[in-house]
Amino acid sequence: MFEEEVVDYIDLRSDTVTKPTPEMREAMAEAEVGDDVYRDDPTVNRLEELAAEMLGKESALFVPSGTMGNLIALLVHCQRGHEVIVGNQSHIYLNEAGGMSALGGIQPCPIHNQPDGTLALEDVVASIRTEDVHHPITRLVCLENTQNICGGIPLTAEYTRQIGDLVHRNDLSLHVDGARIFNAAVAQAISVRELVEPADSVMFCLSKGLAAPLGSLLVGGNQFIARARHIRKMLGGGMRQVGIVAAACIISLEKMTKRLKDDHARAKRMAEGLRQLEGLVVDANSPHTNMVYLNLSDDVALSAQQITQEMKDRGVLVDAENARRFRLVTHYGIDDEAVEKTVFAFQKVLN
Ligand SMILES: Cc1ncc(COP(=O)(O)O)c(C=O)c1O
C-alpha cells in the first residue's frame, strides 16, 4: 500500500480555511445540546445571548452561513418589489448567488464603492427612489465591514453613524454585512458594539478568522429576530442539536476575537517583506486588517495563475483574484514562520 503524502500547506487563500482549535474540539465533544428548533439547546441559547450582548442588540439568531444570514436579513427588511442599495463591490451583490432576487423578489441597486470601501453619502441619497408608480420602493441600505474586495478596509464608527442618520431620516433601514466585523473593531481599537450601534441588523461570521468550523449570527431587535427565526425555518436553516457547533462558536467570541490583532500584525509583516521584492506591487496602505492585496508588476511575464501553481509547488496556497492580482489572508493557521516562508517562496518564484 502506498500512502499519499499529506502536504501541510501554508494556506493564505482565505480565513475561511481555519480549522477548529483543540479547545473547540473538546468543547464540541462535551457540549450540552437539545433541539434548537424547539429552542431547547442550552449552548445555542447561550451563544445567541452572548452575541446579542457583545453587539449591543436585543436578540440574535444562529445561522449556518453568512450568506444565509444576509439573505434572511434582506427577506425580513424587504418585500417583493423593494430595492436595496448595496456596494457594487459587496459580497451581497457579487457573491451570494443573486439570492435576494431569486428568492425574495428584491432588486439590488448597486452603487460604486469608493476606494476606501465606503458608499458616498451623496450617491446613497441620489439612489433613494422617489415615490412614483414606475419605481421600485427603496427599503434598505447595506454596508460591508470590513469591506473585503476594497482591501479588507474597516469602515469607521463615524461613517456608519452618518449613513445610519441618513438612512433613518429617510425611513429606511441599515443592514451591516459584518462577516469580519471583529477585525474591523480590533483594527480601530473600538468595541464592536460601538461600531454597529447605528445598524438595525448585523450579520457576522464565526467561521472566518474566528476559526469555528461553521456558523454566523444575525443580530437585531426582538421583533426582527423573531421574524428572522421564521424565515430561517422556511429556508431550511432550522438546525437540531447544533449546540455541538455553538460550543465552538462561543470560544470564537470569547477567545478568538482577542487574537485577531496577531493576524493583522502578521499581514503587515508579510506586506513589508513582499514590498522588498521586485516584481510585486503591494497596494498602498495594504493591509488594513488581515488581507494583503498585491499586483504583479508589468515586467513579470508569468500570470497570477501560473505563479499560484508555482507557489503551491512550494507549499504555499494563494488566491489569484485575476491574471495580475493576489489576495493573501492571514489567520489562526498562519504563524511567524509561515510569513517568512511565504515571502521566501514569492522571491524564488519571481527569480
Ligand atoms: C464580506 C462577506 N460577507 C458574507 C460572506 C458569506 O459567508 P459564508 O461563506 O459563511 O456564506 C463572506 C464570505 O466569505 C464575506 O466575505
Image: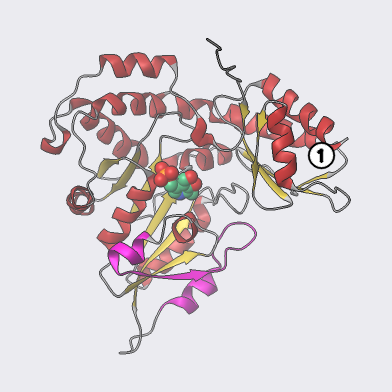
Residue placed farthest to the top in the image? Answer: 1
**Residue 234: horizontal and vertical position, in percent?**
19, 52
* Span highlighted in magenta in the image: 99-128
164, above or below 314, in the image = below
Which residue is drawn at the image coordinates 49% and 59% (left, top)?
94
Residue 81 is a magenta residue = no
Crowd tier of the residue under label 1, counting other residues whose Cα lies within 10 Å: few below 14, some 14–19, many 20 or above: some
Q: Which residue is mark 1?
A: 275
> In this orientation, does residue 294 appear?
no
Image quadrant assignment for residue 96: bottom left
Which residue is drawn at the image coordinates 18% and 26% (left, top)?
42
Whether residue 231 sits left or right of residue 183 in the image: it is left
Picture quarter with the C terminus = top right
Between 255 and 299, the one lying in front of the other is 299
**Residue 264: horizontal and vertical position, in percent?**
62, 33
**Residue 147: horizontal and vertical position, in percent?**
54, 51
Image quadrant assignment for residue 334: top right
Give the mark count: 1
> In this orientation, does residue 5 appear?
yes
Which residue is drawn at the image coordinates 70% and 45% (left, top)?
305
Residue placed farthest to the left in the image? Answer: 38
Say how the picture is coloured: secondary structure
Image quadrant assignment for residue 99: bottom left
7, above or below 326, in the image = above
Between 111 and 182, the one lying in front of the other is 111
